[in-house]
């Protein structure tokens, strides 16, 4: 089901996540989680390097099926996902870090890595389920709204996915397809013929709900507003939704994707505009980031369903860049919230005087989120809109206006938190500036975003992955 | 690729490297002296000017015909690519040289003007980023490069308006500038994409030499919206007087010298696209004329020197739009260079304008302001009163935009949020 190299990456993460719960020292748990994530990150970067510059023999040794889209995709996703998890755990304020937090970070990273490398829907489903555990734990401790948000996620994302996977397994087994029911085997056997018209939409609903796209987005702002622990942001800023779209919906029900694409595209555009519009008027920094995520995911889903190689690769690149940028933004908001004990921007202001480092980091990451030239999101937005424009000019226009609104929202948030005179309602007007570990995490994310923008060739592996996905799904790669 | 190609490409590259060097050193904990910062900034701006000089030599060598410089690709993947391409011609050459010289002058002026100011390093870093952006905008041989420069210029402008971030006024003004820029820039993006669709290229040399294509009108409209935003044209020009909250040096280089003229440059650059469309030309002339009239009336009633200069700038830029609309892009660029230089100088003088005016009054016994007031007497009192009220209210444009766009958008945002909360959370929250 999953090759040995892959298991060597995600296995230890999940194992350590389980074992860590027995540890008593918070510091030791955090250190162990950071070291383990760092090691796996280095391994994944080395694998990416092999794929980009290594010779064919080495590539064959490391990546058993080099050339297939899954490998190229995995090579690009793995370092990003692991860097996000590591940055989150390293920069998390001590006030919110517990043994459980470190374990959650490992668990979520392990699930994301496993899902990226998984070949087969049952593994993807199982890892999606496990990845919900930290949020479920937070929900049990949290208020009624948080529990409702968790249930909403389960019912709209996990349940449709589980039904679809059960159907795929059933029909594939009946058609005599060999375990583990790989997409190519299932599609070529015709096992799902006559059923993709309902399996496809179910898979897309699962993917959209996991990504937080309108109208399945309501869990995102609720979680973003309530969960201050890293588990909240890592659950939202996760590759699982995109992987469900790519490895399940696009791979197993390509014709259905072409059919439902016309219904999903308007929803994606609405999501982009709706999230952007709601984010503009927010006072709560966390909720605002949640709504920004909803808006940006609208653009990503539009690219995924457009069945165009440029749009798809733009969407994937955009998604990866947003994982980095939003992880950084969330870390900064969390840092401010823990220092000032509020996320209400009406009670903040003027923090740049005491925390110029935090302010600079927030500004740079904000610009990287809204496609500023020189950052990875600029390149991806260019590809995405170029791919969408010919067939869907209205959607492209909506995405551009949404991106403009998101830029206004983030720079306005920067102004409200850091500039001007402190709010009359501020409990604290002087806070500690960025700590060395926070600076290191923030700098690493910024550097990754700049490298992705200025020297994007390694990330363009994703373009080949996109072409492979479309070829496999019969989309052609316009 | 020749060495001169690389030299030309470094015109925006040197200031960018300078800004990166300052950012990296400060990030590593270095506390540079003012002298070191000024020396570094002067050096990279000199190098940038030299690079522009190399471009001028190439242009002269080509007998003042367009020089298309291709220095490779930012990225290339299949059919998608982002070409690094620069264009030196009768439009870009004079503007690029003017920009390089004014930036060097700003560097010299600011070394004294901002001495011991807490944001000294920040100012110089942002000025270098701006220098890089404006050269990219002017010399960019494709719409993509021009757009990258356009965005960089816009963001540095916003950050410099909020330079004195302790006060609320500059911060609010910066947000106002940002909102106008971001929304209008969508036009440029759409224009660039339509250009790509219509001509299958975004290179100016190819597009402007090609026969008119179907989407040229849409491209012009998109670009016009962006140009109106950046050049403060009616009715979206209300941000310019507010942008005077920044340091005098940045007001001079951005809103007297370069940034405010970027829209004119853009309209002059794409003039062949709308040259055969009387409707579009009429629209551009109308926008420019309206802006010029509104600007000149508002300048007359402005209580402070910087605002009066800002409105006077708007007036002149409006006239440049009229020149573009009438089919005189070269004249518009000549006007641009002359006006940018004069206005830049006037902005730098504003801190001592009162002193100068008093000295002039003492020497002459009367001022041009008195003569202008006498001219107004020629109009009847009711008309004078009406025009005065319109000008003092800034033609009600600000209030209308606030009432019909900003407030409804925020209201809709809050109502939708409340609705979502009541549906999902089962209660209404403030």
Image (cartoon, coloured by chain):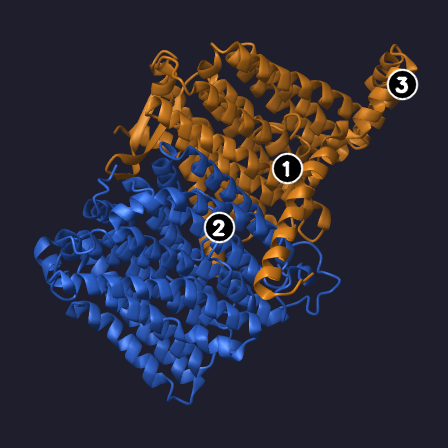
Q: Nearer the viewer, mark 1 or mark 3?
A: 1
Quadrant in which residue B309 is drawn: top right
Chain B colour is orange
Q: Quadrant of the N terminus of chain B?
A: top left
Residue sitting at x 37%, y 66%: A158
* Residue drawn at (13%, 52%) of the image: A188
Residue that sits furthest to the right in the current view: B381
Which chain letter goes with mark 1? B
Q: Residue at x 36, y 11 (%)?
A: B63
- A116 left or right of B100 in image: left
The chain letter corresponding to blue is A
Compute the Cα span from label 3 to label 2: 63 Å
Image location (x, y in percent) of residue B42:
50, 39
Q: Check disc 1 and report the residue beneath it.
A: B249
The answer to whether residue A255 is visible is yes
* Secondary structure type for disc 3: loop
């Amino acid at each position: 089901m999953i090759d040995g190299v892959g298991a060597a990456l995600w296995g230890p993460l999940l194992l350590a996540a389980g074992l860590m719960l027995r540890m008593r020292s918070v510091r030791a748990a955090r250190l162990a989680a950071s070291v383990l994530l760092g090691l796996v990150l280095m391994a994944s970067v080395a694998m990416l390097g092999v794929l980009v510059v290594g010779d064919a023999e080495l590539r064959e040794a490391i990546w058993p099926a080099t050339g297939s889209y899954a490998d190229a995709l995995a090579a690009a996703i793995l370092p990003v996902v692991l860097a996000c998890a590591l940055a989150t755990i390293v920069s998390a304020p001590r006030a919110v870090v517990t043994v459980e937090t470190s374990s959650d970070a490992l668990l979520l990273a392990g699930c994301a890595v496993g899902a990226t490398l998984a070949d087969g829907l049952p593994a993807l489903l199982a890892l999606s389920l496990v990845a919900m555990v930290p949020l479920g734990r937070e929900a049990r401790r949290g208020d009624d709204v948080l529990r409702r948000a968790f249930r909403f996620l389960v019912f709209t994302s996990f349940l449709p996915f589980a039904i679809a996977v059960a159907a795929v397994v059933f029909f594939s087994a009946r058609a005599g397809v060999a375990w583990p029911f790989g997409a190519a085997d299932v599609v070529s056997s015709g096992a799902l013929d006559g059923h993709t018209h309902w399996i496809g939409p179910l898979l897309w609903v699962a993917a959209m709900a996991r990504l937080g796209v309108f109208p399945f987005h309501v869990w995102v702002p609720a979680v973003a507003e309530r969960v201050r622990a890293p588990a909240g942001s890592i659950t939202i800023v996760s590759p699982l939704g995109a992987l469900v779209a790519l490895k399940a919906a696009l791979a197993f029900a390509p014709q259905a994707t072409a059919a439902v694409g016309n219904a999903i595209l308007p929803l994606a555009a609405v999501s982009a505009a709706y999230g952007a519009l709601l984010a503009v008027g927010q006072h709560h920094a966390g909720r605002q980031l949640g709504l920004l995520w909803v808006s940006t995911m609208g653009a990503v889903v539009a690219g995924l369903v457009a069945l165009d190689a440029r749009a798809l690769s733009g969407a994937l690149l955009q998604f990866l860049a947003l994982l980095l940028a939003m992880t950084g933004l969330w870390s900064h908001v969390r840092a401010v919230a823990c220092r000032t004990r509020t996320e209400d921007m009406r009670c903040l202001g003027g923090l740049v005087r005491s925390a110029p480092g935090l302010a600079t980091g927030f500004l740079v990451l904000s610009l990287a989120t809204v496609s500023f030239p020189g950052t990875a999101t600029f390149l991806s937005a260019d590809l995405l809109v170029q791919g969408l424009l010919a067939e869907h000019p209205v959607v492209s226009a909506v995405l551009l206006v949404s991106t403009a609104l998101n830029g206004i929202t983030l720079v306005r948030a920067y102004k409200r938190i850091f500039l001007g005179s402190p709010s009359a309602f501020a409990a604290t007007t002087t806070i500690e500036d960025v700590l060395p570990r926070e600076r290191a995490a923030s700098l690493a994310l910024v550097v990754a975003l700049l490298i992705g923008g200025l020297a994007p060739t390694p990330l363009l592996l994703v373009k080949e992955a996109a072409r492979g996905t479309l070829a496999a799904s019969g989309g052609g790669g316009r | 690729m020749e060495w001169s190609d690389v030299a030309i490409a470094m015109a925006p590259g040197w200031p960018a490297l300078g800004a990166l060097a300052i950012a990296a050193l400060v990030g590593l904990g270095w506390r540079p002296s003012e002298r070191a910062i000024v020396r570094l900034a002067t050096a990279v701006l000199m190098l940038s000017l030299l690079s522009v000089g190399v471009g001028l030599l190439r242009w002269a060598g080509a007998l003042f015909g367009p020089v298309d410089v291709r220095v490779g690709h930012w990225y290339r993947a299949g059919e998608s690519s982002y070409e690094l391409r620069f264009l030196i011609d009768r439009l870009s050459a004079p503007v690029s040289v003017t920009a390089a010289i004014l930036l060097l002058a700003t560097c010299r002026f600011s070394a004294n003007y901002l001495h011991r100011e807490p944001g000294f390093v920040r100012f110089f870093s942002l000025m270098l980023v701006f220098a890089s952006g404006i050269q990219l905008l002017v010399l960019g041989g494709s719409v993509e490069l021009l757009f990258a420069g356009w965005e960089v210029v816009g963001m540095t402008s916003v950050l410099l308006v909020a330079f004195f971030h302790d006060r609320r006024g500059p911060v609010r003004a910066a947000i106002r500038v940002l909102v106008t820029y971001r929304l209008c820039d969508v036009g440029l993006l759409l224009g660039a994409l339509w250009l790509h669709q219509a001509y299958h290229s975004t290179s100016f040399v190819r597009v402007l030499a090609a026969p008119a294509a179907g989407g040229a009108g849409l491209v012009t409209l998109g670009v016009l919206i962006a140009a109106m935003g950046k050049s403060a044209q009616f009715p979206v020009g209300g941000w310019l007087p507010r942008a005077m909250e920044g340091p005098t040096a940045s007001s001079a280089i951005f809103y007297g010298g370069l940034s405010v003229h970027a829209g004119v440059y853009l309209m002059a650059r794409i003039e062949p696209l709308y040259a055969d469309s009387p409707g579009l030309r009429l629209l551009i002339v109308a926008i420019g004329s309206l802006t010029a009239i509104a600007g000149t009336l508002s300048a007359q009633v402005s209580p402070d020197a910087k605002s009066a200069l800002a409105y006077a700038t708007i007036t002149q830029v409006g006239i440049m739009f009229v020149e573009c609309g009438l089919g005189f892009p070269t004249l518009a660029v000549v006007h641009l260079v002359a006006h940018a230089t004069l206005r830049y100088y006037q902005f730098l003088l504003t801190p001592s304008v009162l002193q100068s005016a008093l000295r002039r009054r003492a020497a002459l016994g009367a001022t041009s302001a008195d003569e202008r007031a006498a001219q107004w007497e020629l109009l009847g009192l009711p008309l004078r009163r009406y025009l005065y009220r319109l000008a003092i209210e800034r033609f009600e444009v600000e209030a209308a935009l606030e009432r019909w766009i900003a407030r409804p958008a925020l209201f809709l945002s809050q109502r939708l949020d409340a609705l979502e909360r009541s549906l999902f959370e089962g209660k209404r929250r403030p």
